[in-house]
Amino acid sequence: QKEVEQNSGPLSVPEGAIASLNCTYSDRGSQSFFWYRQYSGKSPELIMSIYSNGDKEDGRFTAQLNKASQYVSLLIRDSPPSDSATYLCASPGPPTGGGNKLTFGTGTQLKVEL
Amino acid sequence: ETGVTQSPTHLIKTRGQQVTLRCSSQSGHNTVSWYQQALGQGPQFIFQYYREEENGRGNFPPRFSGLQFPNYSSELNVNALELDDSALYLCASSPSGRDEETQYFGPGTRLLVL
């Protein structure tokens, strides 16, 4: 079982709509989660992090964490076509004292259409 | 901009050769991690260095090795290149603190092994 799982998509939404991206994780000890955006041919760019259950809002982005159900999601509001990219969910897993490797999902491709 | 730079941007090698990839982090970012990203996949953790010592390693063979220097630069060395080593290699740095989790990625080096 993969530690972090995402639907690869593509997820298509019309311009101005809300895009909902989901991620599930297997290790209940995981305490923090990160969302990265990656444009084709570029490197991942940090969008936001979330550590506590509930919602965290930053501009057009809202991250949601539910530790009981082991999922984390990213909502993107008022999506312009420039939001078209692959969105990666990542977690360092539970603290081990042996470095903080990030485990990534395979990413969900988002297409925002005119 | 994350303040993380990598060189070269692109590289072509042949099977069996050796390659050195370089990364430069911002001042104060004592932790550097290296990832390999194959096409269509999320980044895979190779290893992490903190204050010039290895601080965690992923499931990669010993022919993948690294160094971190006092001036916030680091290297990834790969010996005996194989065709499957073709990928985007990403360097990520983290602010001070051994367990600081937020990682900021450089632009990456795209390696093609023929």
Image: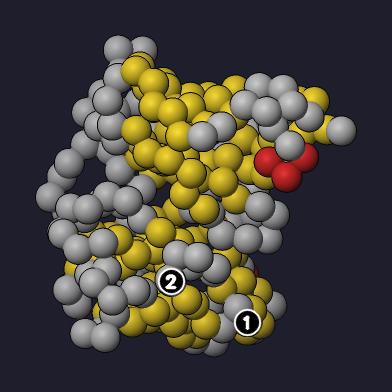
Q: Are marks 2 and 1 in contact (CB under 8 Å)?
A: no
Locate residue A27: give its quadrant.
top left
Q: Where, by quadrant of the figure, is residue A18 drawn?
A: top right
Question: In terms of image quadrants, where is residue B38?
Answer: bottom right
Give the position of the C terminus of chain A as an image quadrant.
top right
Q: Which residue is mark 2?
A: B4
Marks 2 and 1, how far apart in space? 19 Å
**Residue on which the image places disc 1:** B11
Quadrant (top left/top right/bottom left/bottom right) for the N terminus of chain A: top left
Residue B93 visible in the snapshot: yes
Name the amino acid, label 2.
Answer: Val
Please state which of the two labelled residues, at mark 2 or mark 1, is closer to the viewer. Answer: 2
* Residue A108 % position (x, y): 62, 35
* x, y percent for residue B95: 26, 62
SS class, disc 1: strand
User: Quick one: B66 or A32, which is closer to the camera?
Assistant: A32
